Image: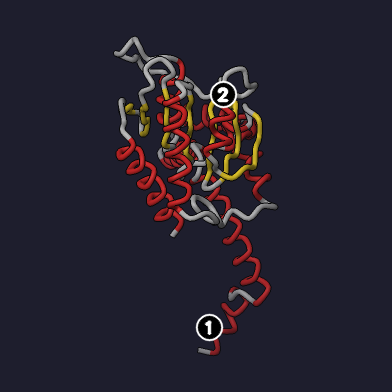
Amino acid sequence: MSELLDRFGGLLPGFKDLVQILIVAAGLVYVLRLLARTRAIQMLLGLLLLVAGYFAARLLDLELIRYLMEKLFAYGVIAALIVFQPELRAALARLGQNRMLRFFGKMEEREVLDELGEAVERLTRARLGAILAIERDIGLDEYAATGTRLQARVSADILVSIFSPYGPLHYGAVLIAGHTIIAAGVILPLTQFPVADKSLGTRHRAALGLSEETDALVIVVSEETTQVSLAQRGRLERDVDAGRLREALAGAALAVTSARR
């Protein structure tokens, strides 16, 4: 036994080694949690598949494939910086922020639901077009950068004033994270898939586009018909009543709460 300890004792990690391992592990967990809230996690999985393919090519001695992938990796760092630029910027911005309190963190869930429900009701009565995106598990910071940053509590008065005619922000979307309006006048991506209903306008197409790229719940108020629509997971639900709207909002809150546990 003593001989084994003498021979392999130098390989056992010391106190400093354990501390360094814990720090690196905590950093990796933090980075993965940040990526998990964005579309970057899908690109990261694709990158891991490429790395696995490279090692498979080396094991099988596939010289052409190995050569091509080595050239790809040579310029991959620059490409990754360009592709992941929004996620990197958002991650750096989060370093000095407390992200523990998210959806319905400081404000009671019922109060937020009431404010959003009242805002939608007042918008329909006034025939004001609007689009509200409720953040769920995937962050919306990338899209918030296209509009005007706000840090305001969810309020029916504020939401109605944003979408009032002739206002500087009423043409874009409002992004809501938890109890906070984080941005207004936001430009959302239009859906890339054919839309069967040709009567759908830009707001509905933008709502579908965001719901295809993220898991956000998007509420659309039509100024022509005063109908309320919901877009989530690439599907559009039209002519939604107040009960169904509240149910969808409560479901979004429950999904985010479960994801945080």
- Residue 67: image x %, image y %? 53, 29
Q: Is residue 174 above or below residue 115?
A: above
Q: Residue 129 in the image: x percent, y percent?
A: 47, 21
- Give the SS element for disc 1: helix
The residue positioned 43% from the left and 52% from the top of the image is 110
**Residue found at x 68% / y 73%:** 16
**Secondary-structure class at tag 2:** loop
Q: Is residue 53 visible to the viewer in this orientation of the structure?
A: no
Mark 2, residues whose alpha carbon is within 10 Å: few (<14), some, or many (≥20)? some
The residue drawn where x is 68% and y is 45% is 93
Amino acid type of the residue tagged 2 in the rendering: Ser
Which amino acid lies under the numbered mark 1 shown in the image of this protein?
A: Leu
The residue beneath circle 1 is 4
Q: Disc 2 marks which residue?
A: 164
Q: Give the numbered dot on residue 238.
A: none
Residue closest to the eye, 165 or 15: 165
Which of the marked residues, 2 or 1, is nearer the chain's N terminus? Answer: 1
State the colouring used for the structure image. Answer: secondary structure
Residue 218 horizontal/vertical position (percent): 43, 32
In the depicted view, which residue is nearer to us: 96 or 50?
96
Q: Nearer the viewer, mark 2 or mark 1?
A: 2
Q: CA distance from mark 2 to mark 1?
A: 78 Å
Drawn side of residue 139 relative to residue 200, left or right:
right
Where is residue 59? Give x, y as percent.
43, 42
The crowd level at tag 1 (other Cα within 10 Å; few <14, some 14-19, many 20+) is few
Q: Is residue 218 above or below residue 14?
A: above
In-image side of 145 versus 176 (left or right): right
In the foreground, 234 or 129? 129
Q: Residue at x 37, y 47 (%)?
A: 250
Quadrant containing the C terminus in the rendered view: bottom left
Say above or below: 255 vs 182: below
